[in-house]
Amino acid sequence: MGYRVVVAGATGNVGREMLNILAERQFPVDEIAALASRKSLGTEVSFGDKTLNTQDIDQFDFAGWDMALFAIGSEATKKYAPVAAAAGCVVIDNSSLYRYDPDVPLIVPEVNADAIEGYSKKNIIANPNCSTAQMVVALKPLHDRARIKRVVVSTYQSVSGAGKEAIDELWDQTKGMYVPGQEVAPKKFTKQIAFNVIPHIDVFMEDGSTKEEWKMVAETKKILDPSIRVTATCVRVPVFVGHSEAINIEFEDHLDEDEARDILREAPGILVVDKREDGGYVTPVECVGDYATFISRIRQDSTIDNGLNLWCVSDNLRKGAALNAVQIAEVLGNRVLKKG
């Protein structure tokens, strides 16, 4: 016996990936509904070898459905998630709306799957920010061994994290660079993204950090350990898919780079590719379409006691969003609903 599953936002990048991953991982589905806004009504989306017609989320009755994977942004989630939850359908939300709510668990299954038990307070589970998700997967096994005191992270985030308009802008600007008179002015981003990097993701806050940077701090504390100090610099780069992070970690106890490499090789959700030679590391292009979080460039930091550096790469549409949501659904099914 399987589940009745809803995917809300099924025509977007993340929604389509959710459908793909549910099919790829053979999630036990008895019935599936693809929801979208009225303007996308009837748009066809794929689920394995099936084609689904999208339904109007405004008219949809969530009663009798087991779980709903939401990829519709905070404003729409604010409207529809409480409706679904009140109807008895567990919401797994990809927006930032509920991540910092103390009554809503924020889950990365490789890190804090046990927190799933808190879902019943609101019938809602939150999916973390894409840049946080891959980082905490890398940090968790190292933290268990040597206790992390402080993390300094610089991100190199692809444009797909900002949606389809951002992908189109990078593509159009890149083409326009080669055609005189057809240059494309920034619209989605604050500055040109093609052949450039922009140290600005989300809005600025009073202390000079951006909200994306604040999210990494707050979410790491909620998911992994509130005592870990985190400072982040988040940068948008001209890459279509795949987020990269340079992570510097300070531990309470000494952790040798070779032991760290061995620990990460055995950790769930991680693939270590770390050869000290040309090309002996993973780049965003190579991680697209993969489930794993890839770790490379593991090395001691000689400037501090008990320090390590590493390079972390993952497909942000998968582990950073859709895959993590499906993994949460798997935990929910296996541990709580227990139908499949």
Image (cartoon, helix red, strand yellow):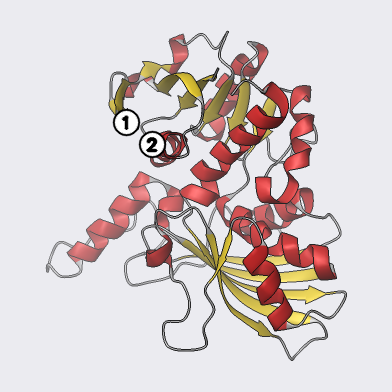
- The amino acid on which the numbered mark 2 sits, given as a three-letter code, is Arg
Query: Quadrant location of residue 17?
Result: top left
Residue 198 appears left or right of 148: left
**Could you classify mark 1 by the number of other residues whose Cα lies within 10 Å: few (under 14), some (14-19), or many (20 or more)?**
some
**C-alpha span from label 2 to label 1:** 8 Å
The image's mark for residue 16 is 2
Q: Would you name the residue on which mark 1 appears?
A: 46
Specify whether residue 38 is in view.
yes
Q: Residue type at mark 1?
A: Ser
Task: Find numbered disc 2 in the image and state the secondary structure of the residue it sits on.
Answer: helix
The quadrant of the image that shows the N terminus is top right
The x, y position of residue 315, in whole percent, is 46, 56
Name the residue located 66 percent from the left edge and 35 percent from the top edge.
Answer: 331
Q: Is residue 156 visible?
A: no
Q: Determine whether, in the image, residue 110 is placed left or right of residue 195.
A: right
> Does the CB distance between marks 2 and 1 fall below 8 Å?
yes
Which callout, 2 or 1, points at the residue further toward the start of the chain? 2
Q: Quadrant of residue 197?
A: bottom left
Residue 73, percent from left and from top: 51, 35
In the rendered view, would you say 9 is above or below 241? above
Using the image as rendered, state which of residue 104 and residue 203 is in the foreground: 104
